[in-house]
Each structure stands twice: as structure tokens, then as C-alpha cells.
Image: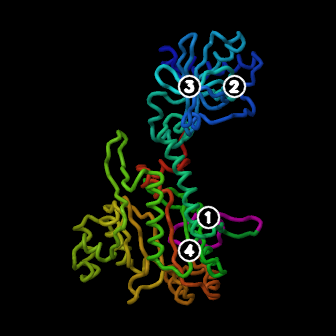
Amino acid sequence: MSDAATPQQAQSTEAELIAIRREKLGKLRDLGVDPFGSSYEVSDTPANLRANFEEGRRVKIAGRITALRDMGKSVFFSVGDIHGSIQGYLGTKGLDEAKLAEWKCLDRGDWIGIEGETFVTRTGEPTVKVEDFTVLSKSLRPMPDKFHGLSDRETKYRKRHLDLMGNPESASVFVTRSRMVAEIRNFFHQRDYLEVETPMLQSVAGGAAARPFETFHNALGMDLTLRIAPELFLKRLLVGGFTKVFELNRNFRNEGISRRHNPEFTMLEAYQAFADFEIMANLVEELTCHLAETFCGGLTIEHKDEDGNVTRTIDLSRPWKRANYHDLVKGVAGDDFFDVTPEQRRAKCDELGVQISPEMEDYEVIQQVFEKKVEEHTFDPCFVTRVPSELIPLAKLSPGGKTVEVYELIINGQEISPGYSELNDPDFQRQRLEHQAGGEEEQKVDYDFIETLESGMPPAGGIGIGIDRLIMMLTGAPTIRDVVLFPLLKKKES
């Protein structure tokens, strides 16, 4: 009856299994049964029924058949969805001829509605004794192997529906992600932040140094880009009188794909008037620990390999470390690293095994050392402060003018969140953005934003949080593709 009911069927090709299912599809229609059903009123969900199980209840539930064991006169099966499943029991002896023929047309993967009374089997399994069933959707393709799930990683990403069917662990990650995102919103709402939406189509891609996706608007006859960050529009709202504002939405960067990068990603940005980067760092620390305690069972996060072996443990216990950028770099490159000439620093990179290019400016060389020797080896939380001013043109300068009032939060070897004391001097902001543009001011500087700042932006603290990376860290996922439902993949050759 199911795809794996006999050794012969187990050895069948996918095409043969599909042919068998299509034959059953035809039989259902011959019986006068709609193979793709209609609405079905339920009294509970499979997962909730199991979690709050009581014997002797009459219930109506619906879900996919995920397991099926036909013992002749008795059939045990599991019915469920992404949240969980419960066992059903059907005595075929009591079915009339038409209903029995209908049941024999069902397979693993089909969606059905069942009605009956709850009981507990002799082995202690919560079960629904089925008195009636309704076909809701006939699956024409076989499910992944019921014992091994879907193991091929590329297929998991290309055909996420099969991954969710066959791997409860994957399904659990995405349910957790959805609930975490809802809780992030709740966290900010409780602190009187207002959620807003800003444009994804922009005439100037600002708020970050990244290559945008470019497009063209036919009606207006103008070039546009998909946004790389919402920052400049959110700061316009501070000027307009919003004092606590956040946006949780998508950004797009036309750059590389890696274990930590997807061209389309989810970012949270939040701004608070009259705050600074220290206040915002405290906020991010509080949020992250709240999520860990709510969804991960505590502040210790285990990362495992594919065999379930723990490879790394991250300790989120507060307070989190705060360290000066220059001190961290000196810790790996030597106390004299900032005292020698730029040429000597380049030579030092060879000794450290850090690859650099001739085009890199001196601050970029230093940043490369930081990324490869500090960031990638920092796993417990660390707020890196007093970052070189050349790296971040949208933050306030520290006393002395060589660094900026920012933090970069590193956890699990990658940046999770930057936070700034926001630059609100319009003249100085113009200078720094034009310097960053490197002679392409008209294409890269948002002068409308500069004009907006001239109307007065209050002192403010701002943060960005890479939601995909945060969830990777909290769930122990090895790559960003494991926490993004539909990651961008290279087109498969036919």
C-alpha cells in the first residue's frame, strides 16, 4: 500500500512509483472521490492533540500520512504536519467495500482528514481510532525515505519541501526561526519602538559599502537599485520626530555566496534617539540572551556536526566581553604592529599567513588581519569597540578622531551585529561619504539624506542585526542555507 510496502516496490524507480500513484489517482476518481479534496473542518491539530492528549475524546484532525504500517485487518499510520504528528489506527474489517477500496488508494505523503476517538495502545502510544476518513490531496511523488530522511545537502536546499517532509530537525529549525522573529518584534514593541517599512527600491544604494542589484523603472525612466541597507531612510524618520524605530526586512547585495552569505538576507535595524553605541550594545546583549533562554533552553549553545558530535560550545553568559579593536589586533600581530611602517605591516601579514592585495590601503590591511586572525577565532560574544574611522563613515568620531564610537559584536567567528553612536553633523557626514565614494559622488552619495540631516537629527544610537546569522548561531546550524528556507542557488544544468 505504501511506497516501501514490499521489497519489489522498494527497488522500484521513481518513475515506476509515480506510475503506481497515478493509477491510484485514477481509481479514486472512478470511485467518485475527489483526489484533491476541499475544505475540512478540524477540532485540533496533530501536534496539539498529542501534547494535550486525553483518552476518550472525539476529534477531527488533518495532516499528511508520514508513516504507514499495514497489518492486514489493522492499519497503523502517522498523520501530521511541520509541527508534529500523532498515530492513527484503522480497522479495515469494519469498512464497507467502497471505503476499503478508497483506503487502498492511499500512500505515504497523501493528505487526509480523520475523525474518531482517542485511546492509548498497549505500548502506551496516544492514538486516534479512525471511524471515518477523507482524502484531501493525493501525492503523486514518493516521500523521502522514512528511515533516513533526505540526506543530500544540495537536494535539501533545492527542494526544501522534501527536506521539511523527511527531516523533522530541519522543520524544527524553521519553526523556531519563525517564532524567534516574532519574539524579536515583540521585544522591540515592549520597549516602545515603532516598526516601519522603508523603500526596497532606491535611487542611491546607501547605508553600507556593498555592490547593489541594479534595475530600471520603465514608467519613470530611471535607474534603481535594490536596497543594501535601510539605514538612511530610518535616520530620516529620526529627523522627522520618531524617537524609537525599527525595521525587520530584506536586504540585497550583489556579492559572493558562502557559508555565511546569501545575496538576499534578513536584517533588523533599530534607532533610538538620545542613546549611544553603549546603550545599544546592552540592548543587543539583552535580546540575544532572551532568545537563547526562551528557545534554546539556556545560555549554552552547542554546535554539532552531521553525526551529532559536539564541535563547539558557545557561552552567552553575561556580561559579555568588550575589547578595543587595536588591542585585539596587537594580541595576534604583536605589540609593535601599529608602530611600524605600512610596508612592515604588509610583511608581517606574510608571517601571519594573511593574504592581502597590492591595491589595499593600510587600514584595509589591518582589517584583513582582524578578520582572519581575530574575528574568525572569536566564538564567545565579544563587543569590539573603537574601530578605525575609515571603516565606518556613518558613526561619530571618538575623542582624538582616529576611531569611531561603535561596537562590532562577534559570536561564533562572525559579525552578528554592528552598533553606532550615529553621526548627525550634516557637514561632516557629507565629507565622509564623499571620501568613501572615491570620486563617484553623484552615483554613491545620497545628497537628499545630507539635506535631511540639515533639518536636525537628534543624537542617537543605532544597531543592525543579521537575523540569519543570529539564528545560525542560536540553532547550531552550520551554514546560512540551513536557516534560509529558499537560499539562492546556481541554476541546475538540465
Task: Name the chief secondary structure element in magenta.
Answer: loop
Which span is picked out in magenta? 199-219
Residue type beneath disc 4? Tyr
Per the image, label 1 sits on a secondary structure element best described as strand
From the image, tell me which residue sits under label 3.
127
**Residue 218 painted magenta:** yes
Q: CA distance from mark 3 to mark 1?
A: 51 Å
Which residue carries the number 1 mark?
226
Q: Which residue does the numbered mark 2 point to in the structure image?
A: 135
Residue 355 occupies quadrant: bottom left
Q: Quadrant of the N terminus?
A: top right
Residue 383's spot in the image, x, y percent?
38, 70
Residue 104 position by quadrant:
top right
Distance CA(mark 4)–CA(mark 2): 51 Å
Tell me if label 1 and label 4 are in contact, CB under 8 Å: no
In front: mark 3 or mark 4?
3
